Amino acid sequence: MPNVSKKGQRMPASPIRKLTPYAEKAKSEGKTVYHLNIGQPDIETPEGMLNAVKNIDFKVWAYTDSEGTLPYRKKLTDYYNQQGYAITPEDIIVTTGGSEAIAITFMTCLDAGDEVIVPEPFYANYNGFANQSDIVVKPIMSYIKNGFALPPISDFEKVITDKTRAIFICSPNNPTGYLYSKEEMEALKALVLKHDLFLFADEAYREFCYDGQTFVSPMHLDGINENVVIIDTVSKRYSACGARLGCIITKNKSVWQTALKFAQTRLSAGMVEQLAGQAAIDTPPSYFKTVINEYSNRRNTIVNALNKMEGVYCPNPGGAFYVMAQLPIDDSDKFCRWMLEKFSYQNQTVMMAPATGFYTTPGAGLNEVRIAYVLNNTNLEKAMVCLEEGLKVYPGRIRSHEASVVSSESL
Amino acid sequence: MPNVSKKGQRMPASPIRKLTPYAEKAKSEGKTVYHLNIGQPDIETPEGMLNAVKNIDFKVWAYTDSEGTLPYRKKLTDYYNQQGYAITPEDIIVTTGGSEAIAITFMTCLDAGDEVIVPEPFYANYNGFANQSDIVVKPIMSYIKNGFALPPISDFEKVITDKTRAIFICSPNNPTGYLYSKEEMEALKALVLKHDLFLFADEAYREFCYDGQTFVSPMHLDGINENVVIIDTVSKRYSACGARLGCIITKNKSVWQTALKFAQTRLSAGMVEQLAGQAAIDTPPSYFKTVINEYSNRRNTIVNALNKMEGVYCPNPGGAFYVMAQLPIDDSDKFCRWMLEKFSYQNQTVMMAPATGFYTTPGAGLNEVRIAYVLNNTNLEKAMVCLEEGLKVYPGRIRSHEASVVSSESL
């Protein structure tokens, strides 16, 4: 019997989905499980986007251009230029979700053994895509104590080698919710110019900034056009995760042309999705106003509830719909599993993502969990009660003087 | 300015799409271009499949399970078991098109430097997916003189090394249309068992077999469950190329579990497509009867017209919707481009795919083109008149005594 590849054996399982069997079991036993583990919002997809699907009028469901249909790329261009990006349809390649945008960007810019620097914690699937291409993720630690702000530039410079090809950021961040400031973005710009590196920016959560804070994209900065590759998706913007529609944006023509060859190999992104994405650009501003207000309220609910719990600390992030919380626990993997397998409060429990999956440094994130605030406030409040009750009786609970020992701050 | 990867530089441009700019130019000059270069049929997608899209009734366009929704996998299981496959939903991973099925299969089973043996000519994008994963395609020549039948098993054995991990077949074949017989499949089975190799089978054209010939899948053979990975897509079956919906089927649990990790990294295939795919399984048999009849007539039109042209030879293939034709020309890339750039007959011309892109052996396919019979008989007839007229005046035409020198038979 032939064996699977070593690459396949190394491939990490999804930290977001690996506890799913325990959640399924809990549900089959009649427990209510609040799913705060995955970035699948309950927010409704804009009606105009769904209507575009319902109103298709073609007879042949055909391939599109590999770079995406021109009408869709034109609409996208309008959207991005309203955000101050100054791009043309020729700077865009439409992809099958943000996932494919990451995979193609990695293959376009890095060879096997090349290194990409990523502030950690980071979206776990970056590891998966890096492993697919045999490229090396070099993590730089960011810390919960300052809300996971950009690490000092000197920390980046320490790990830059002749194999370093790119820096990869995500702002507003998944999993931390942290929103990079203009100053932090300028510091990154100087760094990539100094070392002639690519700057990959995952902007899936662009629309979700709170407390009047402003989103800053590398596309807003002068003089780094040749270095920047933007990775985007409609998944979060329009609560359309299952549409699998994203894009790459770059002003670097060589990158664009090369990415197109990878895009041609898989022929095209979905045709119906591109029609829907085109319609989505006309989503009224009121939709975003309502959604941002809702997320902001949820964040307040979660952050307040967490910080009231004994031994728990949760920074108040500026964007996205995640928080990272430090809990008085021995091991977040054990704890999250225990919450599903052994615990219930009024026949309810909570599913969270253990933070260990968002770090590559061994031991980091052991006392942290990622919580996605993708349920309404009523359910979030119930979920927080469950979490508080769970923490009271969890056998692996650590008292405060012990907690500091395993804090990620000390790593 | 940072450079793109070496992998990106090596990445082949699509031989099917690389002449597109010349076709666009010809059309902008008012020429009618018959597109026989790409496997995008004009056949209508089944109404039930399109209605499933029009009738969506969800409010949140959500991720699905990474392996595909259970309802869709159950329907697929019914379909495959009607074909005699004896599988369960747990043997299937739903993918974003056959393209992703190939990419995931390669990564699951082969590491960088590992080798996969493929009878050539073969679907050009196999090269792209191999290059993505730094794996090595070892071609085995098949010949137009016997209709591109399976090469002798001894030819395979000559190139098997300790790096060889798999044999990759496509039947009915793209680009040749050749349909492997039961005997050929049994020979392949003995080979993969003898050398403990994977057998990857691209079955995109399963439904399209002509003249009463029977399709044989590796899933119909006993004793190689652990070796076989089936790659499938709805693209051609339901003329739904733009749906980007395919799957992997394997009874090898280790392969399935590993492929799932790659699938989890990209989260899920499209939700709407899976609903559409589910409905597609109920497509009435009359649909296929009509379509197969149509393709079979078109094949007859094309094969007859080609073989009547002076210096042209075209085998009569048993399946798919492609033929490979040997033409009295110096260089198929030059010829196909010349047809678009320099030639017209009654203000019309034909776009074909130069066969060189379907071979990896240098010089092979120089006097062959792939023709996809994806237009109706009337247009096919007009296209064949254009081709005949073009061949008469093409400056690189080779007289018959010279033609044998560059024939692929001599390679």
Image (cartoon, coloured by chain):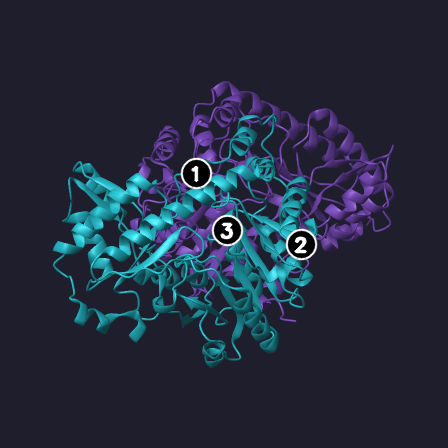
Chain colours: A purple, B cyan
Identify the residue at image location x=45%, y=44%.
B293
- Residue A367 at what x, y percent from top left? 72, 50
* Tags 3 and 1 both on a single chain: no
Depicted A72 relative to depicted A363: above or below: above
User: Label 3: how many residues lie within 10 Å, few (<14), some (14-19) or many (20+)?
Assistant: many
- Residue B238 at what x, y percent from top left? 50, 41
The amino acid type, in three-letter code, at marker 2 is: Asp
Identify the element where label 1 is drawn.
Answer: helix
What number of labels is visible?
Answer: 3
- Residue B111 at what x, y percent from top left? 53, 68
Question: Can you tell which of label 2 and label 1 is closer to the viewer?
Answer: 2
Identify the residue at image location x=73%, y=35%.
A306
* Tags 2 and 3 both on a single chain: yes
Q: Are marks 2 and 1 in contact (CB under 8 Å)?
A: no
The amino acid type, in three-letter code, at marker 1 is: Lys
Report how far apart the C-alphas of labels 2 and 1 lie in the structure. Answer: 50 Å
Q: Quadrant of residue A33?
A: top right
Left/right of residue A316 with respect to residue B343 in the rendered view? right
- Chain for numbered disc 2: B
The residue indicated by pointer 3 is B98
The residue indicated by pointer 2 is B91
Q: Quadrant of the N terminus of chain B?
A: bottom left
**Observer-nearest of A266 and A356:** A266
Q: Quadrant of residue B3?
A: bottom left
The residue indicated by pointer 1 is A182
**Observer-nearest of B224 and A328:** B224
